[in-house]
Image (cartoon, rainbow, N blue to C red):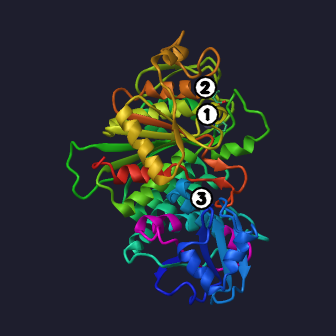
């Protein structure tokens, strides 16, 4: 989709649909919308008086052939209460507006923002909202596809420097859409080997360094925890490491490590999952896909900090060689693990990936993983669970999430929870004893391998994909937390 600034007046532009928004307030027809209302001879005020135009969040009012405007349609999207409005809301309403028009075959739109939202940040939000909304997960449909892509979006009435926001928004949205595309692939089209090939191809195109460890190298590195998961599958595991080095990098400076769980299919292994909804476990690679998408965006945005993504990729299968409950494994760190449940495999592969990231010199670590069903119980699909032991670093991630419009919520990591993963036959066990706290014991397990570097774990099991389409986004992988991680890296030195 082509997105560009356009200096034409809202009433004069010839477009298939002019899109703007109103707030839910006593008189929603104000500011620029009052001007539009004048052009249309008071039509908007009449609609508002009739209660057909209220400004309620994501309300859609579509007017065909609006008198006084050159546009074929005028779409007014509800923006909700003004004091709750944010860039996140603007991103969402742009996306929802675009998808609404898409279903009606519209190919060319023009966004006319409100007088308060003409800055580059707002242009970035509209660009991201539009590109994320235009993405569909239907590449394997041969017959009737989802709605055809939108061809162009003109941004009307913005500050002259808003173009920077368009460029940045496009880079970020394309990174996020890459994560979505990789994660949406079914397991037969995205094995660990294929994921590594895709990551290496992306790195080559973007000028990033990429190293892929094959099963032999993984064994040489003594990644026993990762191998224990991979051994049940005929598909070999891979560890993908992608490095971005800034031009002015001085050795000894900070290195941000982004570790992402990529289980290309999680059957549960011998502790097998029920058949119901097992198909969703093709999404168990969303953490890894997000790191690959983030790296593509960073290659183009060039943050001031060195960043290394480490993505352990494997299937979790119950093959004849599969590990069994009670097996004891030695991780790359040397710590021994009693595998009480083979379905708690994410923490096993992350244990070795985190150790490897530290070996590569990472001074700060963020991991993202569809780790536990328990986080979905705690936070539903609304918030990503945030776990960290370093308050300052955790606060930085929460600030980035807030800036990027990814909803995240801090979870506790008191030492008392450590008791629940204490091993009896080995150093630690991979599930918590006793009842409850499943998301926390998952995080506590990863912590055992982090040592003293600032680290944050993001449990995205509830936020990594939508079971159904949302007004602003197609069903399937969401690409969370690409935007947060991009913000974190871009502001790394100044924060
Ligand atoms: N991939 C799953 C977690 C998951 C569940 C993600 C549902 C998204 C939706 C993970 O590997 C898993 O199976 N975790 C177990 C851990 C348990 C055995 C301690 C879980 O959450 O049930
Ligand atoms: Zn599992
Ligand atoms: Zn899993």
Drawn side of residue 23 relative to residue 290, left or right: right
Q: Of the two numbered discs 3 and 1 on the same chain, state the one appearing first in sequence.
A: 3
**Distance between mark 1 and mark 2 Cα atoms:** 8 Å
Q: Which residues are magenta?
A: 99-126
Query: Is 115 a magenta residue?
Result: yes
Q: Nearer the viewer, mark 2 or mark 3?
A: 2
Q: Nearer the viewer, residue 147 or 392?
A: 392
Q: Nearer the viewer, residue 114 or 260?
A: 114
Query: Is 332 a magenta residue?
Result: no
Is the residue indicated by label 2 positioned so its CB lies within 8 Å of ligand 1? yes
Measuring 54% from the left and 46% from the top, which residue is drawn there?
407
Give the SS element for disc 3: helix
Disc 3 crowd rating (10 Å Cα; few below 14, some 14-19, many 20+) is many
Q: Nearer the viewer, residue 218 or 240?
A: 240
Residue 184 point in image, percent of width and height: 64, 54
Work out whether residue 24 can be spotted: yes
Which disc is residue 455 wearing? none
Residue 367 point in image, percent of width and height: 47, 39
Residue 382 vs 88, above or below: the answer is above
Residue 463 vs 166, above or below: the answer is above
Q: Nearer the viewer, mark 3 or mark 1?
A: 1
**Distance between mark 2 and mark 3 Cα atoms:** 29 Å
Drawn side of residue 272 relative to residue 226, left or right: right
Farthest-out residue, top: 424
Give the SS element for disc 1: helix
Residue annotated with mark 1: 375
Work out whether residue 189 can be spotted: no
Residue annotated with mark 3: 181
Q: Are marks 1 and 2 in contact (CB under 8 Å)?
A: yes
Which disc is residue 438 wearing? 2
**Where in the image, quadrant-wise, is ligand 1 located?**
top right
Residue 36 vs 471, above or below: the answer is below
């Amino acid at each position: 989709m082509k997105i560009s600034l356009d200096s034409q007046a809202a009433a004069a532009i010839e477009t298939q649909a002019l899109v703007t928004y109103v707030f839910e307030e006593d008189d929603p027809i104000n500011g620029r919308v009052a001007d539009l209302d004048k052009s249309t001879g008071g039509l908007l005020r009449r609609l508002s008086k009739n209660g057909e135009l209220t400004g309620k969040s994501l309300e859609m009012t579509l007017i065909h052939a609006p008198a006084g405007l050159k546009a074929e349609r005028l779409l007014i999207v509800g923006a909700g209460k003004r004091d709750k409005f944010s860039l996140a809301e603007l991103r969402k309403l742009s996306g929802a507006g675009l998808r609404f028009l898409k279903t009606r075959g519209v190919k060319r739109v023009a966004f006319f923002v409100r007088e308060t939202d003409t800055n580059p940040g707002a242009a970035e939000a509209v660009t991201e909202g539009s590109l994320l909304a235009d993405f569909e997960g239907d590449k394997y449909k041969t017959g009737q596809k989802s709605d055809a892509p939108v061809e162009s979006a003109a941004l009307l009435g913005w500050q002259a420097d808003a173009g920077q926001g368009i460029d940045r928004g496009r880079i970020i949205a394309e990174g996020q859409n890459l994560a979505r595309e990789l994660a949406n692939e079914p397991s037969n089209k995205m094995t660990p080997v294929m994921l590594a090939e895709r990551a290496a191809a992306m790195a080559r195109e973007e000028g990033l360094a990429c190293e892929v460890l094959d099963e032999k190298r993984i064994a040489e590195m003594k990644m026993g925890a990762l191998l224990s998961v991979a051994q049940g599958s005929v598909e070999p595991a891979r560890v993908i490491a992608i490095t971005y080095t800034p031009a002015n990098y001085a050795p000894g400076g900070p290195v941000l490590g982004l570790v992402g769980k990529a289980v290309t299919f999680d059957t549960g292994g011998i502790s097998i999952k029920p058949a119901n909804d097992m198909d969703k476990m093709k999404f168990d690679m969303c953490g890894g896909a997000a790191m690959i998408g983030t790296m593509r965006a960073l290659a183009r945005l060039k943050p001031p900090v060195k960043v290394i993504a480490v993505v352990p990729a494997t299937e979790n299968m119950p093959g004849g060689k599969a590990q069994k409950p009670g097996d004891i494994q030695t991780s790359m760190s040397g710590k021994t693990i009693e595998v009480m449940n083979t379905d708690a495999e994410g923490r096993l592969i992350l244990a070795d990936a985190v150790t490897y990231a530290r070996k590569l010199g990472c001074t700060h670590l963020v991991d993202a993983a569809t780790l536990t069903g328990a986080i979905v119980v705690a936070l539903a699909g609304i918030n990503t669970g945030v776990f960290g032991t370093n308050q300052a670093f955790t606060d930085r991630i929460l600030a980035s999430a807030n800036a990027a419009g990814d909803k995240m919520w801090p979870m506790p990591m008191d030492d008392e929870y450590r008791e629940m993963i204490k091993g009896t036959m080995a150093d630690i066990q991979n599930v918590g004893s006793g009842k409850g706290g499943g998301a926390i014991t998952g995080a506590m397990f990863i912590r055992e391998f982090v040592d003293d570097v600032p680290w944050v774990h993001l449990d995205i099991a509830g936020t990594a994909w939508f079971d159904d389409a949302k007004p602003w986004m197609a069903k399937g992988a969401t690409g969370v937390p690409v935007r947060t991680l991009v913000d974190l890296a871009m502001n790394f030195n100044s924060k």
